[in-house]
Structure formats: C-alpha cells, structure tokens
Image (cartoon, helix red, strand yellow):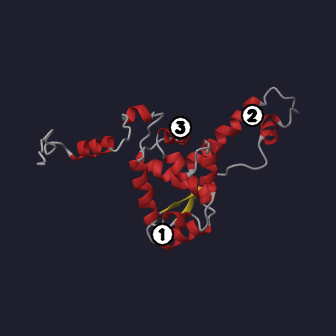
C-alpha cells in the first residue's frame, strides 16, 4: 500500500509567537487573552526611583548617614531621592512619593511631615554623618538654619494665640502662656554644615 502525503497548510510564514500558540492548542491547552486573566488595579512609575536607589546604594550613602538601619535613616534617604527626582516641600514630598513606588521602596509609607523634620534633626546627631562631614569638609563650621528658627518662632506665636483665651496672670503676659503651651521636647533648630575657606 502506497502512502500518500497531502499538504494541509504551510506554516513557514507564521511568526514564532503564532507557532508557539498553535503548538499549545494542538497539545490541548486553553489560551485566553491576557486582558481576560489580569486586571490592572494601579500602575505607578518605578524605573527612575530604582535607578536613584541603586546609585545611592553603590555610592555607600546609607552607611555615610548612619551606621545602622533605622526609620530616620530611611526617611533621610527617601528625602534625598525625592529631592533628586521631584523637589517639593516636606509636606508635598510625603504626598508626592505615593504617586511612585518610592514610599514602599524606602519603607517610608507612613512617614509624616513632622517625621521628616525629626529625621533631619537625627541626622545632625549621627556619628557617621558627623565623621563624614568632618573628613570631607575639614574647613566646615556649624551654623543654624535661619528658616528653621523662623519656623519655631511661628509655631510659638501660634501656640501663644491659641492659648490667649486661657486665664493668666497680668505679670506673665503672652510669654507665660507660650511657656506653658510649649511641649517639653520637640524638634530643635537644625545646625547645618557650611563650607568656609581657610583663614
């Protein structure tokens, strides 16, 4: 008996993707459109955040800021990354970084504006940061951030106005009310390192 062959279809014109799909169908697998299997709930930019994070890690920036991992160090690193990518105020920064993956990548999803200010105060007391500044900027000197001082003055004035209705002795006046309303502890004026030329 002579076997005859008949060409049913020529597959040479199909792409590799089509051949893979055809092979899967012939093996009995069921194929579905990707849109039918997955639902995109949210999509946030991530590539630029990852690029900055990797660069900071390769430069050894985390170790320069603090010898040990801590929430404050993570917040400072996140502020530096945010400053590179999209400079904003502290409050705007805590809102902006939720539009990207920065908050999750740096572990600062729950950080508030006051947390960022506290992290900046922590930074200037970090032995690793002080040593790095001393080594890299031997002629630097510590000064005070005048804008931070103004911020404290405004906060004290606000507390003074808020407590103006409270009874107080005439001799104390507003200063007495402010001293009672001020918290026992809180953020202090931030000293900052400034470069100065040698004498």
Give the labeled residue for mark 3: 95
- Compare residues 129 and 49 and report the one nearer the observer: 49
Q: Position of residue 119 (x, y in %)?
A: 61, 53
In the visual, does 45 lie left or right of 6? right
* Above-or-below relation of 89 to 196: above
| Badge 1 vs badge 3, beta-carbon distance below 8 Å | no
Mark 3 or 2, nearer chain start: 3
> Residue, x 59% and y 68% (percent of image)?
67
For mark 2, give the secondary structure. helix
> Residue, x 53% and y 67% (percent of image)?
64
- Compare residues 181 and 97 and report the one nearer the observer: 97
In the visual, does 65 lie left or right of 188? left
Q: Which mark is residue 124?
A: none
Which of the two marks, 3 or 2, is nearer to us in this view?
Answer: 3
> Residue, x 65% and y 43% (percent of image)?
152
Mark 1 or 3, nearer chain start: 3
Give the labeled residue for mark 1: 137
For label 1, count other residues whose C-alpha is less than 10 Å away and answer few (under 14), some (14-19) or many (20+).
some
Which of the two marks, 1 or 3, is nearer to us in this view?
Answer: 3
For label 2, count other residues whose C-alpha is less than 10 Å away and answer few (under 14), some (14-19) or many (20+).
many
For mark 1, give the secondary structure. loop
Mark 1 or 2, nearer chain start: 1
Q: Position of residue 110 (x, y in %)?
A: 62, 44
Cα distance in 3D space between marks 3 and 2:
30 Å
* Above-or-below relation of 77 to 98: below
For label 3, count other residues whose C-alpha is less than 10 Å away and answer few (under 14), some (14-19) or many (20+).
some
- Compare residues 80 and 2 and report the one nearer the observer: 2
Give the labeled residue for mark 2: 160
């Amino acid at each position: 008996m002579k076997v005859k062959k008949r060409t049913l279809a020529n597959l040479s014109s199909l792409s590799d993707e089509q051949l893979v799909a055809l092979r899967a169908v012939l093996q009995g697998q069921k194929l579905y459109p990707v849109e039918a299997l997955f639902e995109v709930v949210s999509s946030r930019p991530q590539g630029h955040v990852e690029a900055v994070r990797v660069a900071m890690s390769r430069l050894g920036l985390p170790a320069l800021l603090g010898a040990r991992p801590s929430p404050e160090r993570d917040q400072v690193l996140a502020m530096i990354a945010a400053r590179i990518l999209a400079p904003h105020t502290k409050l705007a920064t805590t809102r902006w970084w939720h539009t990207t993956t920065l908050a999750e990548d740096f572990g600062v999803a729950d950080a508030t504006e006051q947390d960022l200010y506290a992290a900046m105060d922590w930074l200037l007391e970090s032995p690793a940061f002080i040593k790095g500044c001393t080594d890299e900027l031997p002629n630097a000197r510590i000064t005070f951030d005048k804008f931070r001082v103004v911020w404290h003055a405004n906060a004290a004035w606000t507390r003074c106005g808020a407590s103006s209705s409270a009874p107080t002795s005439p001799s104390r006046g507003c200063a007495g009310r402010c001293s009672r309303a001020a918290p026992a502890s809180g953020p202090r004026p931030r000293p900052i390192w400034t470069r100065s030329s040698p004498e």
